[in-house]
Amino acid sequence: MPERKRKWKLIYVLAVLGLFGIAYLCQYLARDGLIINYGIRFYRNLQGGILVVGSAVSLVVLLLYALDLRKYTAWLQARGEENAGDSTETPEALSAKSRHREVLSVSRKMDSAKLKELLTEYAAQKWRALSQPLMQIKLQLDIMDEHQEKLSHLLDANGADALANTEDVLDRVEQYLCKNVRKVLNYLDVADSDVPKDIQLVREKLAVCHDEGQKQLQQVQEFLFALADFLNKQGEDDNTMEMLDIYKSTILSSIEEE
């Protein structure tokens, strides 16, 4: 096993370095006795010999280990390329699959912008035969974004902080539209774009999604007009939240029916 051999070679390197370290330490500790018995010249020669031999041997061992480590790195790289070659999916395909799973996950709030990217991708590639209805649904998500921007501007311009909860209503409508789009995308994933029966089935699902989206967008548009009327009547005696509450309850009940 290359990994096991590499570990043993590292142990050998450390052992050699350790031995020379111990030899140098021993001659240092026995310095006084060596000098008394053999003289200062002998001690210096011994000290120099240990340093020279130890340094030379250690350098050779380290070089050999470095070369072996380089071979081991090359082996790992070759093994990784071999495993990558065995995969039936390209890195681009794996990345797209991961991105798709992230966009359609039900475990988090859905991202309208990413759904629009997927709709555009399907319309331009695999499902060009249904590009028009796919782009119509994308347009609905664009319109929903515009409605949310209009609401935010309306509240800011009129200093209507007390009505900030109306933004939550539109957020819930957007999530409802996104979940309907998710259903269509799941059908696109399992259907065959070359089979007429599958194409017709997906076309019908797209039509249902579009019709439901139009219904919700119409209600949101009416809600925005009602909100504008309410803000225009600020300070008047007959200005109540009743009509706004009716619109909010109508919208929320319509998206909670399913």
Image: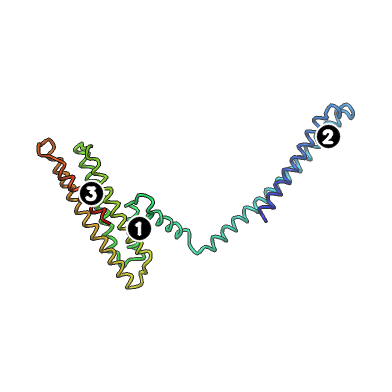
Residue at figure coordinates x 88%, y 28% from the top left: 39
Cβ atoms at labels 2 and 3 below 8 Å apart: no
Q: Is residue 87 left or right of residue 181?
A: right
- Nearer-the-camera pick, 249 or 60: 249
Q: Position of residue 46 (x, y in %)?
A: 83, 34
**Callout 2, which amino acid?**
Leu
In front here: 135 or 108? 108
**Residue under the image location 28 percent in, 48 percent down:** 171
Quarter of the rendering containing residue 195: bottom left
Numbered badge on residue 17: none
Closest to the camera, between mark 1 and mark 2, is: 1
Q: Is residue 61 left or right of residue 33?
A: left
Name the residue tied to disc 1: 118
Q: Which circle, 2 or 3, is nearer the viewer?
A: 3
| SS for callout 2 | helix
Task: Decide which of tag 3 and tag 1 comes sooner along the chain.
Answer: 1
From the image, tell me which residue sits under label 2. 46
Question: Given the image, on which type of amino acid does mark 1 rest?
Answer: Leu
Residue flagged by tag 3: what amino acid is it?
His
Q: Which mark is residue 147?
A: 3
Q: Residue furthest left?
A: 237
Looking at the rendered structure, the secondary structure element under dot 1 is: helix
Q: Is residue 104 above or below residue 156?
A: below
First in residue order: circle 2 vs circle 3: 2
